[in-house]
Image: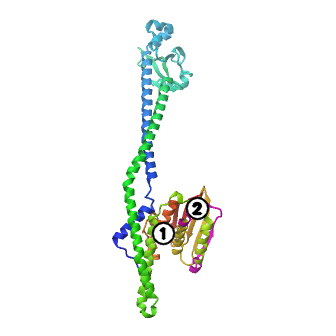
Amino acid sequence: MKLLIKPPLMSLITISTQIFSRGFLFPRKRLMLTYLVAMICILGTSGISLYLFLIKNLNQQLDRELLTLVEAAAPSLNIIKSEGLQSLDREVPWRNLFSEQEYSLEWYDSEGKLLAREGTQFPHMSLFKTISPAQLNKGFPVLQRLGHIQTATISVYANNPDEETPILEGYIRASESTQEMEVILDKLRVGLALGGTTALVLVSIGSIYLTQEALSPTQRGVQQISKITSDVSHHLRTPLTRISIATEILLSKKDKIQPEEVKKLNIINTAVEQIRRLVEELLFLVRADLPSKLRESVSLKPLLQPLSQQFESIAQARGINFQTELLSNVLVSGDSVRLTRLLTHLLENAFNYTDPGGSVFFSMKLSHGTVIISVRDTGMGIADGDLPFIFQGFWRGELAQNKQPEGFGLGLTIAYAIVQQHQGEIKVSSQIGVGSCFQVHLPLA
């Protein structure tokens, strides 16, 4: 017999299931964290972009100044070669030209031998140790950073009246200390750090307010749905109880009614029991929030041992091989009743979809601060295309519907909700005709 529910009620149940099974009631922390991460990325990207832009501009400015200096000094190479450095003072006052800057000039002959130098900031390495002659002879300025010194080097040529190829006269290298620029960058970094920290504090305060404002309408709507769903579920209990009592009274007088009527009454009883179970599962999902004050340290073996014994009896009755491997002294933080319900649903699924002669394995193991509880079976398995949907409320695959037509598709939804409440994770692997394995990962207390 298929259970029929009127569309409005079915829609309300579906909406409620999706909301409460996915932990939608309290996304405040997640929303606020997402907002903060987004703002940190925006602020960080903006700050880094500004910093890199300023570094690029400062370097370009320094390079332009050095190129201007070295090109202006090009005609002086012949004077240095013929008359020496002292002769420059008669032509150009080099010592006063950049008196307020930490510039330096070096003159080299065509073999890279130092002829003269003027200034205070020089690289510690000779010319050809940092630049190859081939690189210099291409005719383009060479810009380099050597420690805290920025340099610009050019080749100087003289016209050869006898040949088209100019004659290499030598090289000139201009240098300037980058310490002043680094002081500016240090101040910029401090300013960006202070500004970023201030902005982050303001963003954090703003995110709390904006999150509250954004979620207030949603929470009011969710609370209203919760109340309506809870009220509907409670109101369903009374007529269901009356129907159940009436059918039980009639069935107690089987000798006075026809066998066909007895069959119909049993069908009614089965439908009532299905609806009652649906109501109980729906109420559980509506009340699915697990406040931290309800958490306690739960020892798993005393909780799982009775389950193991209960399903051992079921396994014997159905001809299924049931194997358990439980650990002692394993504690998790949570609610023992809900954990029991979680594992009951997983074990019921395993037994419902495993044929006689098959096997169900129930085991525990520890891994990196978590306990992994596995329920594995050799049942019919789940199709790959169905795996992404198995935790959705009221969703059942075609194979599952054929195997267990009376199910509602809420068992795994409830299991998923309970795992989420315990800050855990549930994983599933399956193969058609081979079986399924559900693994629940719970953090240790």
Residue that numbered label 1 is attached to: 411
1 and 2 marks in contact (CB < 8 Å): no
Q: Nearer the viewer, residue 379 or 3?
A: 3
Question: Element at badge 2?
Answer: strand
Q: Amino acid at mark 2?
A: Ile
Residue 164, can we see it?
A: yes
Q: Nearer the viewer, mark 1 or mark 2?
A: 1
Per the rendered image, the range of residues in magenta is: 314-338
Question: Element at badge 1?
Answer: helix
Q: Is residue 58 above or below residue 33?
A: above
Q: Is residue 238 above or below residue 30?
A: below
State which quarter of the image contains the N terminus.
Answer: bottom left
* Cα gap from disc 1 to disc 2, whole angstroms: 20 Å
Q: Is residue 94 above or below residue 136?
A: above
Residue that numbered label 2 is attached to: 372
Name the residue at 45% across, 85% down: 248
